[in-house]
Image (tube, rainbow, N blue to C red):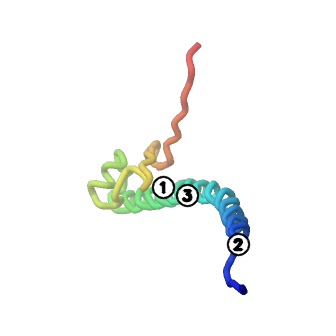
């Protein structure tokens, strides 16, 4: 008998190789997504700073807060797309970084 096909051992080896590759690829995909989220937030903060300059040109003064830019349709939101807050201090927008302090 001359049968065509794969043996069970060959199929198991292929499945083990594919599983190993997936084990290596999946962590890299999740790290890439986090990096892309951070980069998109940085880009949005740059856009907000540009819109602050546009507001100054139009009104000859700094906006009182970021909500003013939202109300006057200069920007859509005071947060990044991933929900990260944007702080506004002295006419400059930046990504809010949370720092925790422990008391002893």
The answer to whether marks 2 and 1 mark residues whose Cβ atoms lie closer than 8 Å is no
Instruction: Tell which tag, 2 or 3, sits nearer the viewer.
Output: 2
Side of 68 where 3 appears, left or right: right
Quick one: which residue is furthest to the left in this view? 71
- Residue 73's image quarter? bottom left
Which is nearer the N-term, disc 1 or disc 3? 3
Contact, mark 2 vs mark 3 (Cβ under 8 Å):
no
Residue assigned mark 2: 7
Mark 3 nearby-residue class (10 Å; few <14, some 14–19, many ≥20): few
Label 1: few (<14), some (14–19) or many (≥20) C-alpha neighbours in 10 Å: many
The residue that disc 3 covers is 33
User: What is the residue that sits farthest to the bottom in this orientation?
Assistant: 2
21 to 64, vertically: above or below: below
The percent coordinates of residue 89 (x first, y second) are 46, 42
Q: Position of residue 24 (x, y in %)?
A: 69, 58
Assign a secondary structure to mark 2.
Answer: loop
Q: Secondary structure at mark 1?
A: helix
Q: Position of residue 34 (x, y in %)?
A: 56, 54
How far separated are the C-alphas under marks 2 and 1? Answer: 57 Å
Looking at the image, do the residues carrying marks 1 and 3 touch, with CB atoms under 8 Å apart? no
Q: Quadrant of the N terminus?
A: bottom right
Q: Is residue 100 left or right of residue 5?
A: left
Say the numbered circle drawn on residue 45. 1
Mark positioned earlier in the residue sequence (2 or 3):
2
> Which residue is painted at 40% across and 62% down in the image?
54
Marks 2 and 3, Cα distance to the nearest angstrom? 39 Å
Residue 88 to residue 26: above or below: above
**Residue in the image at 52% along x and 56% along y:** 37
Left or right: residue 71 versus residue 62 is: left
């Amino acid at each position: 008998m001359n049968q065509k096909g794969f043996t069970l051992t060959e199929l198991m080896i292929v499945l083990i190789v594919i599983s190993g590759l997936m084990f290596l690829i999946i962590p890299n995909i999740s790290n890439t997504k986090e990096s892309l989220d951070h980069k998109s937030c940085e880009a949005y903060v740059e856009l907000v700073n540009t819109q602050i300059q546009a507001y100054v040109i139009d009104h000859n003064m700094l906006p009182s807060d970021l909500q003013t830019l939202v109300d006057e349709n200069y920007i859509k939101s005071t947060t990044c797309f991933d929900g990260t807050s944007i702080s506004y201090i002295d006419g400059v927008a930046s990504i809010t970084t949370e720092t925790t302090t422990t008391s002893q």
